[in-house]
Image (tube, rainbow, N blue to C red):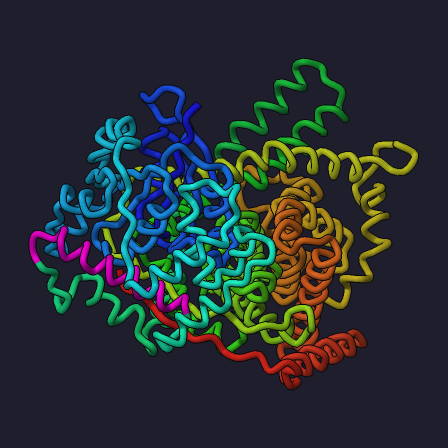
C-alpha cells in the first residue's frame, strides 16, 4: 500500500483537494485551521494508495500542535510521496513550506492550486519553469471547480523519478550546515541528514533528537550569528526567502502589480476597520439569528411541531398503538416519552439548518477570518489572542470540534484557556434552549438570541482576565498572525455539505443519546418509588428534583421540572428541551403549536427564564465536549477544574442577573440577594485584582492573501 501525504499552508484548498481525490466530504472553510488532525482516504481511480490529509502548516518548525502532527508524520512515518498544495495567488509565502519539504528528500508533487485567483490578480505562472527550478512535478489546478484533479492522479506515478533540488545558501551558511552534519546521528536516513543539520543550526527545539550524544553545535551557531549579527533562525529564514524570490521571479511570465487594489482590499477597508468592524459583525450576526430564529427558521419549526408531529406523527402513533391493544403505560412511554421528547428537540431542526446554512455561507465567503481579526483587538486586551476566536466560531456548530480547534494556537496558556472557555459560546445543541425561552417568554425576539452569543463572548473575555491570574496559566499570549483569504462566491457543494453534516450530527444525537435520556425521564416521571404509575408531581423524578431544587431557587427556577431539565442538560444540552417536553406532556398539547410555550410562560417569569437560559448556556457542556477538553488539557484534574469553573461562573452570572433583576424591575429584595452580592464581589475582585505575573499583551498582524 502506497502512502501519500497531503501538506500545505492553511487555507490553500488542501481539504478541497482531498475531497476531490478521495470522494470524501471533509468540512472545508475559507479560513485557517479547518483541518485540526490528520485524516485518511483512498484516492479514487488509483489502486493501493492511501492519502493522508495533514493539518495546515506554514513551516516545519513546530510551534503549534498541528505543526508537530504534520512534521512528526513526515519524519517518522516516511510517506512514499508528498502532495504539496500551494496557493498560486500567494506563491512566495507558500513556497517557504515547499522548499523545506524538498529538503527532507521525499518525492514531491506540487499542486499549484487556485489558479483562477492567481489569474484574477494578473499573475501568469510557468509551471514548467517552477518545476525545473524546484526539482519536482508541478500540476496546475482549481480544485474548487474540479479542474486539474485528473492531472494530479496522472502525475503520481512519475513523481519519484524527479530529483529534488536543494536550495544553496551563502558559503558561510553552507559551511555551518556541513559542520553540523558531522554531528548528526549515523542511523538517521541519508536524505534527512541535511534537513536535520539545518534544524540544528536553526536551534530548533527538537533538533537534539537528531544529534549524536555529546555533540555541541553552539560554537558553530555562535560563529554564524556573530558573522551575520542575527539569530540563526532568522539567517536561515532569510536565506530561504532569497532563494524563493529568485524562484518566483523565474517562474512568472509577467511581474506582479503589488499596488493593485483588489476587491477584497476594498471590502476590508470597512469590515476590518477599527471602528466599523465590530458594529458590522454585530449587525451580521443579528441578521443571521433574526432569519434563523424569528422568520424563515421559525416557519419551518412551526410546521414540524404543528403539522409533522402534532397532526401526523403523534396522533397516528397513538391511534396505531390503541388499535393494536398496546398497554396504556407502554403506549404512553412510546408516544409521550420517546416520540414526544425527541420531537420537542427535532422541532427546532429547521431553525438550526437555516443558521448552519448562513454560517456556512459566511465561512465560504471568507468573512470568518475577518471576524477573528476584528475580535483580536478586543481579545488581546483581555490577555487572549484573536486566534482564540477561531475555536469559538467553530464551536458555534458543535463544542467538540470547537474545543479541538484550540490546538491550532501556539501559546500553551492561550490554548488551555481557550479549551476551557470555548463552550461558553452557544453551540447548535443550545439553540433549542434559546429558541424555547425567546419564543415562550420574549415573543421570539432575535435580541435574546444575539444577547446569548454576546454574553458568551463576555464570559470568554472575563475568563481571560481571571484565569491568567492562576499560576498554572502563566505565560504570554501568542502574537496573532492571521491570513485574510480573498473573498469569493460560496461553493454550493461545500455550503450544502457543511450544512447537512452539522444538521445530521444533531439528528443522530437526537436519535441515540437524547432518545435514551427522554425514555429515562419519562419512566422516572411516570412511576413512584413503589413502581406504581402516578402523576408526574408524585413521581420519582419529582422527589429527586425537589430534593435538589433549593440549589437553583436563588436563580429563579427552583421548581423540580427545571431542576431536572438542568441536570439532564449536563449530559447533553438538547436534553433540556426534550426533558421539559416530556414533563409538560408535549405530546398531548402540541397540536395547536403554541401550548408548550404557554405552559412555560405560566410557570416562569421572563426574568427567571432568562436566568435559566444563562445558566444552561454557560455551565459545563455535554459529556462529549468534556471528553474533548480532557484531551486538550491533558489531565482529569485540569478538566475537573475547568468543569467546576464553568458551573460556578454560570451560577454566579445567573444569580446576579436574577436577584438584581428583581430589585431593578420589581423592587423585590430576597434573602438570596446575599448570594448575588457575594458572587458580584468575588467576580469584581478577580477582574480588577492586579495580575501577579505581569502577563504581556500580544501583538497583532494580519496577512492579506
Is 242 included in the stretch rendered in magenta? Answer: yes
Q: Nearer the viewer, residue 104 or 271?
A: 104
Q: Main secondary structure of the magenta part?
A: helix
Q: Residue at x 81, y 39 (%)?
A: 535
Residue 49 figure quarter = top left
Furthest-left residue in this view: 254
Q: Nearer the viewer, residue 696 or 667?
A: 696
Residue 661 figure quarter = bottom right
**Residue 154 % position (x, y):** 24, 27
Location of residue 686 with respect to 7 vertically, above or below: below
Q: Residue at x 41, y 51 (%)?
A: 195
Q: Nearer the viewer, residue 205 or 568?
A: 205
**Residue 39 % position (x, y):** 47, 37
**Residue 211 % position (x, y):** 53, 53
Furthest-right residue in this view: 530
Q: Nearer the viewer, residue 144 or 304?
A: 144
Q: Residue at x 33, y 46 (%)?
A: 102
Furthest-top residue in this view: 324
Part of the protein shown in magenta = 232-254
Q: Residue at x 81, y 51 (%)?
A: 545
Is 96 included in the stretch rendered in magenta? Answer: no
**Quarter the C terminus occupies:** bottom left
Image-based side of 550 in relation to 295, left or right: right
Image-based side of 115 in relation to 231, left or right: left
Image-based side of 473 in relation to 46, left or right: right
Q: Count of labels shown? A: 0
Amino acid at each position: 500500500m502506497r502512502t501519500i501525504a497531503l501538506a500545505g499552508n492553511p487555507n490553500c484548498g488542501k481539504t478541497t483537494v482531498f475531497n476531490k481525490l478521495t470522494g470524501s466530504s471533509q468540512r472545508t472553510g475559507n479560513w485557517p485551521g479547518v483541518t485540526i488532525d490528520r485524516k485518511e482516504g483512498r484516492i479514487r481511480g488509483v489502486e493501493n494508495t492511501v492519502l493522508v490529509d495533514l493539518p495546515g502548516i506554514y513551516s516545519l518548525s513546530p510551534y503549534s500542535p498541528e505543526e508537530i502532527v504534520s512534521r512528526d508524520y513526515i519524519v517518522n512515518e516516511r510517506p512514499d510521496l508528498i502532495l504539496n498544495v500551494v496557493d498560486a495567488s500567494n506563491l512566495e509565502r507558500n513556497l517557504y513550506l515547499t522548499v523545506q519539504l524538498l529538503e527532507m528528500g521525499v518525492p514531491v508533487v506540487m499542486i499549484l492550486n487556485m489558479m483562477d485567483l492567481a489569474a484574477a490578480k494578473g499573475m501568469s505562472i510557468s509551471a514548467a519553469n517552477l518545476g525545473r527550478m524546484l526539482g519536482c512535478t508541478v500540476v496546475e489546478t482549481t480544485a474548487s471547480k474540479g479542474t486539474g484533479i485528473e492531472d494530479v492522479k496522472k502525475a503520481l506515478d512519475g513523481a519519484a523519478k524527479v530529483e529534488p533540488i536543494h536550495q544553496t545558501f551563502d558559503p558561510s551558511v553552507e559551511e555551518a550546515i556541513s559542520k553540523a552534519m558531522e554531528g548528526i546521528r549515523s542511523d538517521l536516513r541519508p536524505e534527512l541528514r541535511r534537513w536535520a543539520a539545518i534544524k540544528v543550526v536553526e536551534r530548533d527545539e527538537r533538533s537534539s533528537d537528531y544529534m549524536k550524544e555529546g555533540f555541541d553545535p553552539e560554537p558553530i551557531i555562535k560563529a554564524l550569528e556573530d558573522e551575520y549579527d542575527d539569530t540563526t533562525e532568522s539567517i536561515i529564514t532569510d536565506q530561504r526567502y532569497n532563494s524563493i524570490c529568485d524562484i518566483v521571479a523565474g517562474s512568472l511570465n509577467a511581474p506582479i502589480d503589488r499596488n493593485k487594489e483588489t476587491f477584497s482590499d476594498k471590502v476590508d477597508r470597512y469590515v476590518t476597520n477599527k471602528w466599523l468592524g465590530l458594529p458590522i459583525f454585530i449587525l451580521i450576526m443579528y441578521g443571521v439569528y433574526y432569519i434563523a430564529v424569528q422568520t424563515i427558521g421559525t416557519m419551518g419549526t412551526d410546521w414540524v411541531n404543528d403539522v409533522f408531529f402534532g397532526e401526523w406523527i403523534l396522533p397516528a402513533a397513538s391511534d396505531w398503538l390503541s388499535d393494536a391493544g398496546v398497554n396504556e403505560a407502554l403506549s404512553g412511554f412510546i408516544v409521550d416519552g420517546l416520540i414526544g421528547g425527541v420531537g420537542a428537540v427535532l422541532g427546532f431542526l429547521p431553525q438550526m439548518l437555516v443558521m448552519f446554512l448562513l454560517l456556512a455561507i459566511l465561512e465560504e465567503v471568507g468573512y470568518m477570518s475577518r471576524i477573528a481579526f476584528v475580535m483580536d483587538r478586543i481579545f488581546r486586551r483581555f490577555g487572549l489572542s484573536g486566534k482564540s476566536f477561531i475555536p469559538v466560531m467553530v464551536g458555534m456548530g458543535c463544542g467538540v470540534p470547537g474545543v479541538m480547534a484550540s490546538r491550532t494556537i501556539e501559546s500553551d496558556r492561550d490554548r488551555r484557556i481557550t479549551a476551557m472557555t470555548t463552550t461558553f459560546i452557544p453551540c447548535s445543541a443550545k439553540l433549542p434552549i434559546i429558541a424555547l425561552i425567546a419564543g415562550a417568554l420574549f415573543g421570539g425576539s432575535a435580541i435574546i438570541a444575539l444577547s446569548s452569543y454576546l454574553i458568551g463572548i463576555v464570559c470568554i473575555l472575563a475568563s481571560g482576565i481571571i484565569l491568567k491570574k492562576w499560576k498554572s496559566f502563566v505565560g504570554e499570549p501568542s502574537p496573532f498572525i492571521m491570513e485574510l483569504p480573498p473573498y469569493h462566491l460560496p461553493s454550493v457543494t461545500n455550503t450544502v455539505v457543511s450544512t447537512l453534516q452539522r444538521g445530521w450530527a444533531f439528528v443522530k444525537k437526537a436519535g441515540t443519546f437524547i432518545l435514551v435520556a427522554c425514555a429515562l425521564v419519562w419512566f422516572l416521571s411516570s412511576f413512584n418509588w413503589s413502581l406504581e404509575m402516578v402523576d408526574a408531581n408524585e413521581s420519582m423524578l419529582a422527589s429527586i428534583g425537589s430534593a435538589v431544587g433549593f440549589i437553583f431557587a436563588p436563580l429563579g427556577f427552583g421548581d423540580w421540572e427545571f431542576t431536572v431539565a438542568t441536570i439532564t442538560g449536563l449530559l447533553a444540552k438538547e436534553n433540556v428541551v426534550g426533558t421539559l417536553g416530556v414533563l409538560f406532556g408535549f405530546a398531548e398539547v402540541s397540536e395547536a403549536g403554541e401550548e408548550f410555550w404557554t405552559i412555560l410562560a405560566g410557570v416562569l417569569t421572563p426574568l427567571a427564564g432568562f436566568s435559566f437560559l444563562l445558566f444552561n448556556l454557560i455551565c459545563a457542556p455535554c459529556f462529549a465536549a468534556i471528553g474533548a477538553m480532557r484531551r486538550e488539557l491533558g489531565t482529569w484534574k485540569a478538566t475537573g477544574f475547568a468543569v467546576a469553573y464553568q458551573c460556578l461562573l454560570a451560577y454566579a452570572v445567573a444569580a446576579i442577573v436574577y436577584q438584581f433583576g428583581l430589585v431593578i424591575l420589581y423592587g423585590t429584595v430576597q434573602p438570596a440577594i446575599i448570594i448575588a452580592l457575594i458572587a458580584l464581589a468575588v467576580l469584581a475582585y478577580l477582574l480588577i485584582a492586579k495580575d501577579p505575573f505581569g502577563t504581556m499583551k500580544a501583538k497583532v498582524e494580519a496577512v492579506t492573501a
